[in-house]
Image (cartoon, rainbow, N blue to C red):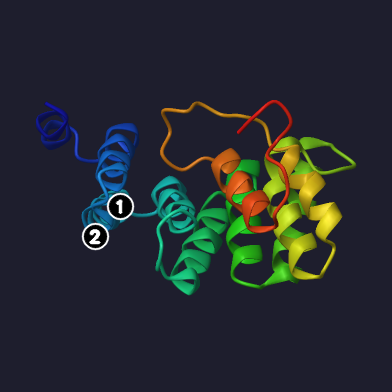
Amino acid sequence: ELDQRLRARPGDEYLVGLRAAAAYRQGQSARGRGIQDESVKVNAGKPYPHNDRAWSALCVPGASLPRALEDARTAVRLSRYREDTYLDTLAAVAAEAGALAEARQAIVKAQRLLGMLGPEEHLQYAHGRIAEQIGLREEAIRAYQSVPREDPREWCTTHALAQKRLKALGAPPQPGGP
């Protein structure tokens, strides 16, 4: 039924996202990536498909971080630097790729958009990745533990990423369970 609805509305970002997530959840990374690639083509000039494809790279083993970083940069540029969600993706992907200065700059820009002084909860994953990569283990653990829980039906959440990093660091999961 989803495929039928997508044929009727091929540019529907929500439906494309559901279809790609279903493929990824089933372990069909190449299919999920293909769905996202098609969405980028169909939605030329829109930031969301680039952002979605960039974020997915954080959860797909072996995904190309340089490509994800370019997608994240494109989403931010297409949004004219006005969407904190896209800046969050850029921060997380840049930190994952080791582009720490760019990650920090994206966090600061997102904070300015949100009128904040410190990292917002959804920016804590990127903050943790930066801290971890410069050797601030305890700071990274605090950042990961502060990432809020999200809808467990989502296939690639910031919370799940943070829990993986906590496990890799040998730290307890977020207080109250994973």
Identify the residue under disc 1: 36
Residue 145 location in percent, x, y? 74, 40
Placement of 48 over or under 70, stated as above or below: above
| In contact (CB < 8 Å): disc 1 and disc 2 | no
Closer to the N terminus: mark 1 or mark 2? 2
Residue 139 location in percent, x, y? 85, 53
Q: Is residue 10 left or right of residue 76?
A: left
* Res. 126 image quadrant: bottom right
Q: Is residue 139 left or right of residue 67?
A: right
> Residue drawn 41% across and 39% down?
155
Q: Residues within 10 Å of mark 1 (few under 14, many from 20)?
A: many
Placement of 76 over or under 111, stated as above or below: below
Q: Is residue 143 left or right of residue 20?
A: right
Q: Is residue 84 left or right of residue 146?
A: left
Q: Amino acid at mark 2?
A: Ala
Is residue 83 among what the camera can see? no
Label for residue 30? 2
Q: Say which element carries label 1.
A: helix
